[in-house]
Image (cartoon, grey):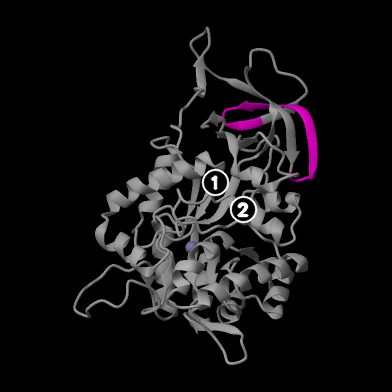
C-alpha cells in the first residue's frame, strides 16, 4: 500500500492571525452525477472545511487547485457490510485463531491497516457490522478516525452483534474452557432488549443480529437453515433499536431467517443468498435493503465446500437472488463482507462488477455503492453525492467506469473530508 499522506491542512492563518478556511478547487474532467445519472464535463468542485461548497465553472480566486482534468470523478465509495477487526476467515480455523491468539490491541492494529487499504481503494465510509469478539474496540476505531489519530474510512459501527446461546462460535472446545464468543449472546425478549440498550450506550450506531445458521438442502432441493432468535426476541431487538433511533441489520441467508427478520421489521438483510419470491416481494414493498456480499460468497465457496458443499450452492443461489431482487426493485447497497475475506487479497470494489454481471447497469451499480448505501445510513445529501453541503469525499479514476465497471478497482485519487489521502 502506498503511504497515506495529508497534503492539505484544513486551515491557514490569515494576515490578521484569524484562522480562515482554505478553499480547494478540484478540477474534474468528467464528473459522474450518480443521483441524476448524468456525466458533467469540466466541473470545478469547490471544497471548504471538509465539505463541498459549490460546483462551479471556474476556479475561485485564491483557491488551491487539484487538477483531475484527465480523470473521471465520483463520490467516495461506501461499503455497507465490513468487519475491520477481522482479517479473513475462509475456514473456522482462521476465525478461531484470530479470537484465541490475537489480543484486542493487536487486532486493533491490524484493523488500522485494513482501514488504510479500504480508504486507498476509494471506500471513504464503512458500515462495520460486527466486531467478532472485539468488545467495543470498533467504537474506539471510529473515534480515532474521526479525531484524526489514524487515517481511515468514516465508520458506522455495530459493536458486538447479537445471537442466541449456542448459535455462534467459538464452538467445539472442551466444555470446561471459557472460550471467547464472536457475538454477544442473549436469550428471551427482556435480555435481548437489555443487550441492545447496552450496545447503544457504549456507542453502537447500528444493531446487528444473526437471524439464521446451519444451512442445508431439503429433499426438494430448496436451501433452508436453523432460525436463531424467536419472533418475540427479534421483535424486542428491533423495537428497542428503533425506539433509540438505531437501525437493525440482519444476517439472514435463507427464507427461514428472512421470515422472522422481516416480520420483526429489520432494515437490511445481509447476504440474503437464498431469496424466495415472498421475501423479494416483501423487501421490495417495504424497501428493505439487500447487502448481497457476493465478494465473500465467492471467496469462501472454495475453501468451505471442501467440508460442506452447501457453500458452493449458496454462492450460486446468491447470484440468482441478486438478479431477481434487482429486477423486482429491491434496493441493493454495496456490501462485501470485507474482513470475511482478507483485506489485502481482494479489492472490495469487485462487488461493483459482480452486480453489473447480474443485470445492473454501471450507473445502478455505482448508485448501490454511493447514494443507496448513504440512504441506508441515513446520510442522504451528506454522503454518496457530489453536491453542495455534502462531505468532500471524492474518488478519481483514470478510466471510465460506465464503459468498464472494473475501473472502480483501479482508483488513482481519493479525497476524504477534503483531505487528499491518495
Ligand atoms: Zn459479515
Looking at this rendering, what residue extends furthest in the top direction?
15
Identify whether 176 is placed above or below 141. Answer: below
Identify whether 262 is placed above or below 341. Answer: below
Examine the image and state in which quarter residue 339 appears: bottom left
In depth, the one of 116 and 1 nearer the eye is: 1
Q: Is residue 287 left or right of residue 90?
A: right
Looking at this rendering, what residue extends furthest in the bottom direction?
219
Give the residue pinned by disc 2.
Answer: 378
Work out how far the residue at label 2 is from the one at label 1, CA to CA, in angstroms.
13 Å
Q: Residue at x 63, y 17 (%)?
A: 63
Is residue 178 located in the magenta-colored stretch of the structure?
no
| SS type, badge 1 | strand
Can you see residue 283? Answer: yes
Q: Residue at x 57, y 89 (%)?
A: 218
Can you see residue 243? Answer: no
Residue 310: x, y in percent? Answer: 52, 78
Examine the image and state in which quarter residue 165 appears: bottom left
Q: Which residues are magenta?
A: 34-52
Amino acid at each position: 500500500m502506498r503511504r497515506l499522506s495529508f497534503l492539505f491542512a484544513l486551515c491557514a492563518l490569515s494576515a490578521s492571525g484569524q484562522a480562515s478556511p482554505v478553499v480547494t478547487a478540484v478540477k474534474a474532467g468528467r464528473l459522474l452525477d450518480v443521483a441524476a445519472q448524468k456525466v458533467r464535463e469540466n466541473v470545478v468542485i469547490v471544497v471548504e472545511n471538509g465539505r463541498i461548497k459549490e460546483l462551479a465553472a471556474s476556479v475561485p480566486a485564491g483557491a488551491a487547485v487539484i487538477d483531475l482534468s484527465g480523470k473521471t470523478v465520483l463520490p467516495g465509495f461506501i461499503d455497507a457490510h465490513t468487519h475491520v477487526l477481522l482479517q479473513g476467515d475462509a475456514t473456522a480455523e482462521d476465525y478461531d485463531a484470530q479470537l484465541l491468539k490475537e489480543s484486542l490491541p493487536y487486532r486493533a492494529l491490524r484493523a488500522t491497516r485494513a482501514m488504510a487499504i479500504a480508504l486507498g481503494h476509494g471506500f471513504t465510509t464503512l458500515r462495520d457490522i460486527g466486531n467478532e469478539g472485539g468488545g467495543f474496540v470498533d467504537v474506539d476505531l471510529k473515534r480515532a478516525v474521526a479525531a484524526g489519530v489514524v487515517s481511515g474510512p468514516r465508520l458506522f459501527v455495530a459493536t458486538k452483534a447479537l445471537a442466541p446461546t449456542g448459535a455462534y462460535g467459538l464452538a467445539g472446545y472442551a466444555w470446561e474452557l471459557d472460550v471467547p464468543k464472536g457475538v454477544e449472546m442473549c436469550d428471551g425478549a427482556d435480555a435481548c432488549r437489555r443487550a441492545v440498550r447496552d450496545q447503544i450506550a457504549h456507542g453502537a450506531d447500528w444493531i446487528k443480529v444473526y437471524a439464521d445458521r446451519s444451512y442445508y438442502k431439503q429433499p426438494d432441493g430448496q436451501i433452508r437453515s436453523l432460525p436463531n432468535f424467536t419472533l418475540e426476541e427479534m421483535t424486542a431487538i428491533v423495537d428497542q433499536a428503533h425506539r433509540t433511533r438505531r437501525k437493525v441489520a440482519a444476517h439472514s441467508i435463507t427464507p427461514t431467517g428472512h421470515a422472522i427478520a422481516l416480520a420483526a421489521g429489520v432494515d437490511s438483510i445481509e447476504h440474503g443468498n437464498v431469496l424466495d419470491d415472498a421475501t423479494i416481494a416483501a423487501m421490495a414493498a417495504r424497501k428493505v435493503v439487500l447487502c448481497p456480499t457476493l465478494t465473500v460468497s465467492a471467496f469462501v465457496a472454495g475453501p468451505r465446500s471442501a467440508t460442506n458443499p452447501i457453500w458452493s450452492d449458496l454462492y450460486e443461489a446468491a447470484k440468482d437472488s441478486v438478479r431477481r431482487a434487482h429486477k423486482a426493485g429491491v434496493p441493493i447497497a454495496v456490501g462485501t463482507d470485507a474482513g470475511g475475506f482478507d483485506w489485502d487479497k481482494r479489492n472490495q470494489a469487485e462487488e461493483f462488477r459482480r452486480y453489473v454481471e447480474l443485470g445492473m447497469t454501471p450507473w445502478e451499480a455505482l448508485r448501490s455503492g454511493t447514494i443507496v448505501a448513504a440512504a441506508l445510513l441515513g446520510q442522504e445529501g451528506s454522503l454518496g453525492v457530489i453536491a453542495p453541503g455534502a462531505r468532500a469525499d471524492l474518488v478519481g479514476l483514470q478510466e471510465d467506469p460506465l464503459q468498464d465497471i472494473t475501473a472502480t478497482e483501479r482508483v488513482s485519487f481519493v479525497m476524504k473530508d477534503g483531505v487528499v489521502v491518495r
